[in-house]
Image (tube, grey):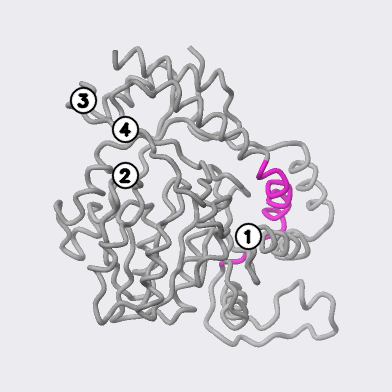
Amino acid sequence: MPAVAFAQPSIADPEIAEVVATLRSGWLSTGPRVRAFERRFAEYVGARHAIGLNSCSAGLHLSLLAAGIGPGHEVITTPLTFCATANAIVHCGATPVFADIDPTTLNIDAEAVDAAFTPRTRAVLPVHFAGRPVDPAVGAMARRCGVPVIEDAAHCIEGVSAGQKIGSTGDFTCFSFYATKNLTTGEGGMVTTDSDERAAWIRVASLHGMSHDAWARSGSSASQYDVVVAGYKYNMMDLQAAIGLHQLAGLEERLTHRERLWQRYEAGLADLPVVRPIATAPGDRHARHLYTILIDERATGWTRDGLRDALAVRGIATGVHFKAVHLHPFYANRYGFERGACPHAERASDQIVSLPFSAALSFEDVDWVVESIRSLLT
């Protein structure tokens, strides 16, 4: 039985060589490679500004703060996401309001967002789940109500929504470069925005609130700086950007390979009693970050966790994306959330399985996963 990793990163010789060159350069933290990575990323997504950070979580936090989110405010988001999305809202002193998902796309539902608006709503934070772009109606609704859209695009670097590249669609868009992501720097993230003022604030706030970072000061006789805001230690370093530069250059090629893996899953699982991802909407491009299926015990004879355990015995690692955020103890205890608040998200939370999926996966790996699922379900 071959061992199939869940999301092994695809790292090649150019990334390794660039890291070695960075180590030898004598400049390891925020410097020329971060600036180059930011420029190329902004060009890729079609945004005016891109600011490199140490995580998508940092990007969400700083974007919310830049949008003026604070105590007494509400931010509408999805319950089917990683906890970092909601945590960032809490860190601003605001209250997360969970709007249920569309049960077919697993993205936040536009009608549920509309119903969640109150006089305290100050932002909408949609998540492009698994790489599928969110319905543009969500952003249009937020703008009609005069509140900013802060997109969590941790899964959606290559995504396109209604012909427009993700990263140029929201007031702020936050990306993740974590180890399992389509573009990885090990840890890391990026925020894109078209606002000169907000981009400048995020850049300063991301590094202790200093008016000039060390790289900017290194080329000038002015070695002093002013602290203009009580900032954070959220900056990206050149060692991360060294990987990111080459990951970005090969991004479309890796997407092509994942598209082929996706179609292989689709063909192999088509006649089984599992719920597969629906087709992508016209004008959209799915970033193919996660390949997820839903396991209904009544249809399959298996619980989700039972099937995962059986696949693990066959050397196949799977994931759960995600346990609905409002069901986690912190959110349930602090805000009084209970089951029934978001039934579609709760059903997905109970049944979802993320199958092995990354650009490092081979066709033979996918065939083994498909063969194993078929043998267990039939």
Pick whichever of labels 1 and 3 is earlier in the sequence. 1
Residue receiving disc 3: 299
What amino acid is at disc 2? Thr
| SS state under label 3 | helix
For the residue pair 352 and 282, the one nearer the viewer reads as 282
Vertically, is 315 above or below 360? above
Q: CA distance from mark 1 to mark 4?
A: 31 Å
Q: Pointer 2: what residue? A: 104
> Would you say 297 lies left or right of 106 here?
left
Q: Secondary structure at mark 4?
A: loop
| Magenta stretch, main secondary structure class | helix
The reply to whether the magenta stretch includes residue 189 is no
Q: Earlier in the sequence, mark 4 or mark 2?
A: 2
Q: Earlier in the sequence, mark 2 or mark 3?
A: 2
Q: Which of the 4 image quadrants contains residue 316? A: top left
Q: Where does the image place residue 101, in percent across and percent down from the top left?
A: 29, 53
The residue shown at (31%, 57%) is: 109
Q: Which residue does the image show at 17% across and 59% down from the upper left?
A: 337
Q: Which mark is residue 116?
A: none
Please tell me the numbered disc located at residue 45: 1
Q: CA distance from mark 4 to mark 2?
A: 9 Å
Q: Position of residue 122 (x, y in %)?
A: 35, 78
Q: CA distance from mark 2 to mark 3?
A: 17 Å
Instruction: Decide: few, some or many residues near mark 3? Use Cα within 10 Å; few <14, some 14-19, many ≥20.
Output: few
* Residue position for label 4: 275
Q: CA distance from mark 3 to mark 4?
A: 10 Å
Task: Tell me which segment is drawn in magenta.
Answer: 234-252
Q: Residue at x 56, y 66 (%)?
A: 234
> In x, y percent, where is residue 107?
36, 52
